[in-house]
Image (cartoon, rainbow, N blue to C red):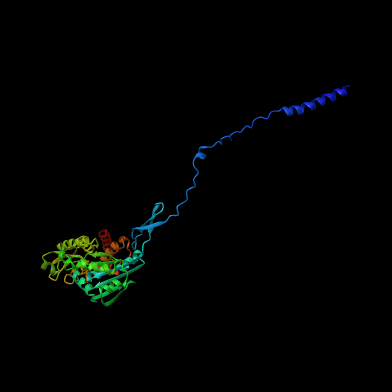
Amino acid sequence: MAMKKALAFLLAILMIVPLASCNKTEEPEVTTEPAPVQTTAEQTEPVTDAPTECAHSYTEEIAEKPKALKDGSKVLTCSACGDSRTEAIPATKTLKVLAIGNSFSQDATEYLWDIAKDGGVEKIIIGNLYIGGCALDKHYSNIKANSGAYKYYKNTNGRWTETANVSVQKGLADEEWDIVTVQQGSHQSWQEKSYEPHGTKLLEMIKKCAPQAKVYVQQTWSYTPWDGRLGKWGIDQNQMFEKLESAYGKFAKNHNLDTIKMGEAVQRFRKELPVKYVNDEGKDSNAYDVVGVNKFKKLKDGKNWLDGDAFHLNRKGEYLQALVWTAKLFNADVTKCKYVPQYLKDSPDTVKLMQKIANEVAK
């Protein structure tokens, strides 16, 4: 009986399940939007490519040209991004100097090679186109006529060579000169009107033949008090210096040239180290031991420093002048110069004075 009841219950269950399945209603399909993605502030910014580093394309501009003993500088600027920096240009360690002059340029360059070498210049070439007493008008006439009227002195190794019958053009073409110097004849140096128009014409010819060279004016010096020409001109030594200083200064300013102030150095030495000389009649005369004198050659102290004449420099003066040139042209501190000619080794105070004066007038 119990068995029958169980079977009946199971049969009832089996009949209900299909019925429920048949009566089930289909529910409508529900669609939903995807949930928004949570983002950070950084993620909301537009996405761009990372900047690339500039490849830099630099152009160079020379700020200061290098000299024999002084570094120069250049500015490099990137044409793409504007980046800029300054770099040093090493000192050239070379210098080529040509003087168009006379015996006064000989005096000035006699020891130039030795002093420059001592200062660290590795290659020095010095030339001097020489005609005794030659003035600006004569130099111009010679260069205009291409006249081989000069003795050409040259120093490349500490020793001078001499070549006759050389023209200014040939001398200018002999080397690629860094510097060319010009001077007025000393006897006309105090006369301002004597400088033009030939000075301008000479400079134009130099520029044409040696456009790479920088031109300097070589200032000459005034004569000793016993030079008879001073009396004829109606001036004394100091007046001659004042006039030549003014004339050279105006000429240099008019042509935008630097001046090698040799005359000023000589004049200062005269004032700072005066020496008493006695002439043939036993009369005193104030002088100094840089200008050589024949007539006034007996010093009161019995020492004879002199071997020149009344307007050229002696060997001591040549050393002073070479110091001035080195200080000016090489931008060198010549108080550190160790080279001293043999005849000055027993005069250390005089050497120091010369070096001090050269440094000061070169500024």
> Which residue is painted at 13% across and 64% down in the image?
236
Q: Nearer the viewer, residue 277 or 84?
A: 84
Q: Nearer the viewer, residue 50 or 163?
A: 50
Instruction: Let me know if residue 308 appears in the view.
Output: no
Q: Residue furthest top?
A: 1
Instruction: Let me know if residue 136 appears in the view.
Output: yes
* Quadrant showing the C terminus: bottom left
- Corner quadrant of residue 297: bottom left
Q: Nearer the viewer, residue 195 or 143?
A: 143
Q: Where is residue 254 drawn, in percent x and y?
A: 21, 61
User: On screen, 217 above or below 46?
Assistant: below
Q: Where is residue 41 drawn, in percent x and y?
A: 50, 37
All told, the count of numbered labels is 0
Q: Nearer the viewer, residue 225 or 45?
A: 45
> Which residue is painted at 87% across and 23% down in the image?
4
Q: Where is residue 339 drawn, in percent x and y?
A: 32, 66
User: On screen, 5 above or below 320?
Assistant: above
Q: Is residue 241 left or right of residue 108?
A: left
User: On screen, 1 above or below 244?
Assistant: above
Q: Where is residue 172 drawn, in percent x and y?
A: 28, 71
